[in-house]
Amino acid sequence: MRNMQTKGLLTALTALLLTAVIALGGFSAAAAVEQGNVLKGLEGYKAAFEASFALPEDDESKLYPDVWGLYVLARTDKMDDGAYSFMVPAADPNAAGSGIASSMATEVLGAALKGGDFTQGENSALAKALAALQQDGAFGESSYDNIWAVIALEVANAAGAGAGYDKAAAGGVIASFQQEDGGFNDFGEGGEVDSTGMAMIALALTDQSAALEKAVSFMEQSMQEDGNLVGNGEWSSANSCSQAYGIMGLVAAGESMSAKRWSAAVDALLAYQDAAGCFWYDAASQNGEEGAFYTAPDSISTIQGLMALSDIAAGNSLWLDMAGYYDKEPVPESTAAEPETTEPVLEQPSSQQAETEPSAQDSSNPKTGDEGVSWIVWVLIGAAVVAIVFAVAAPAIWKRKNSPQNGGQNGEGTQDPGDGE
């Protein structure tokens, strides 16, 4: 009886300890769920693609391979899987001559996602043609052209394209589109969430930290009680596309989507996904309300939702990762802007200062936006360890105490008064 009780106690306490260790160790159960949602959604998107083959070429609902689908294939390691080859777009031979920055940029990004060679040949020429569009720092009149030109060129140059352009000037141009509320919108006053999310990726790549911080504040102020991100523009509404790009922008800004301040935004995005894994544009469409924008999950909402979920699951932005953004060595804040000096090195901060001012190099610090490790976790770990040690040691101590050598009645020890019949 005692052995059964001890075994049960050990099992329960071990589970408690594992729960605490998981919470401490950084394993995100939410990330595992989101990765599962990405895979499920990809299958739903693939099924929709296959169904669209029978549609005539002029049908607006017919699906064609594009760079955004490649984004999800790359995230799920399906790029070389023959079952998904029909979702991989062919190169556009006319892209270099279009003269439209956003069109050229998406072609560059598609080639990069497919692992194309940018050190020479057509990909290198395309990247350099895109760079050559820059005039007075700008690649076009819209923030959209400038945002995607920067993202594409940073990705291409990380792959060896050598496409020279004025990165600082380009970042300044993008920041100049920022509105007073911190958002971006090419079509009116007041920031839109999706436009802002795109801009945040380029702002991170061009080191526009002040503008990026302002955009994060815009996102925080845009979050409704239900977690939906709704901007201030004329066409702003709660929908999965805005939600997806808002989240992608926050991830690019270094925000942890598992942090308390953003978790509701992730839940709101997941609420648009149906049982087949596809995403509805908005709640009205999802609920079948009269006059709804869509009568079924649409491909754009689905692929953007999957892009965002894949960023959350990976914990980073794929575009930033491909551009080598995360490979940069962080510069300690204490020396980043200080001129050279011959003054003696100051004393190390006191232990109290060290607790309140963690080092920029301390990899154990939580990411921007994280809540850190709760003291409750430490209490659970301590209590579980002590209890397990006691549970393991107690039977041995009891047996030793009641052995013949210690005055026990027999070699097996006396019955524990707490044991039943």
Image (cartoon, rainbow, N blue to C red):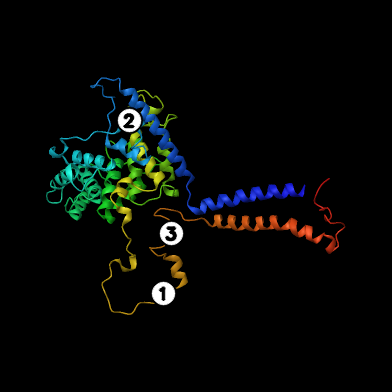
Against 210, residue 310 (above or below) is above
Amino acid type, residue under disc 3 in the picture: Asn
Amino acid type, residue under disc 2 in the picture: Ser
Give the residue at x 80% y 51%: 418
Residue 193 lies in quadrant: top left
What secondary structure is marked by label 3? loop
Residue 388, how many percent across, how many down? 65, 55
Q: CA distance from mark 3 to mark 1?
A: 19 Å
Residue 191 visible in this rendered orientation of the protein: no
Q: Nearer the viewer, residue 181 or 175?
A: 175
Residue 305, how many percent across, how many down? 36, 37
Query: In the rendered structure, which disc, 3 or 1, sits on the residue that comes first in sequence?
Result: 1
The mark found on residue 267 in the picture is: none
- Please give the residue where the numbered disc 1 appears in the rendered image: 348
Q: CA distance from mark 1 to mark 2?
A: 56 Å
Which residue sits furthest right? Answer: 409
What secondary structure is marked by label 1? loop
- Please give the residue where the numbered disc 3 appears in the rendered image: 365
Badge 2 local density, few (<14 within 10 Å), some, or many (20+)? many
Give the residue at x 60% y 48%: 15
- Please give the residue where the numbered disc 2 appears in the rendered image: 299
Give the residue at x 67% y 50%: 10
Query: In the rendered structure, which disc, 1 or 2, sits on the residue that comes first in sequence?
Result: 2
What count of labels does the image hold?
3
Against 301, residue 266 (above or below) is below
Amino acid type, residue under disc 1 in the picture: Gln
Query: In the rendered structure, which disc, 2 or 3, sits on the residue that comes first in sequence?
Result: 2
Give the residue at x 86% y 56%: 410
